Image (cartoon, rainbow, N blue to C red):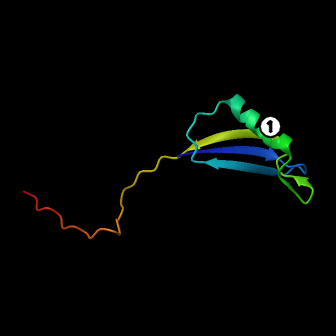
Amino acid sequence: MKTLSFSFKSSLGKTTSIRLNKYEADVTADQAKQFAQIVADAKAFVKDGVNLYATPTGAKMTETQVTQIYHVDEKKEPQPAEPQA
């Protein structure tokens, strides 16, 4: 699973971020910069007069590998193990 995180400074200089989960495409640095700038320019996230995402400061991608080691299927009855020969 991939997560894309964008960091910003608010109009008060506090660090803020936006996280996009479960995206599939590869994202270039230019695409990330363009997206972050569009978010900042939109000024759509204002709370109490503070632009929460005023200045883009970075972006990072985190990739998580999940390996399932145990799972119980509650819909099925447990089956006895086959005898070993």
Above or below, 79 against 15 in this view is below
Q: Nearer the viewer, residue 70 or 53?
A: 53
Q: Residue furthest left?
A: 85
Q: Residue at left 90%, top 49%?
A: 11
Residue for badge 1: 37
Viewport quadrant of the C terminus: bottom left
Name the residue located 74 percent from the left edge and 49 percent from the top edge.
Answer: 17
Residue 77: quadrant of the picture: bottom left
Image spot of residue 28 (x, y percent): 65, 30
Where is residue 15 shown, x and y percent of the image? 80, 50
Counting from the top left corner in percent of width and height, residue 37 is at 80, 37
For badge 1, the amino acid type reads Gln
Image quadrant of residue 70? Answer: bottom left
Q: Residue at x 67, y 45 (%)?
A: 5
Kind of element beneath mark 1: helix
Judge whether 34 appears above or below 75 on screen.
above
Badge 1, how many Cα within 10 Å: few under 14, some, many 20+? Answer: some
Relative height, residue 72 to residue 65 (above, below): below
Displayed quadrant of residue 57: top right
At 35% from the left edge and 69% from the top edge, which residue is drawn? 74
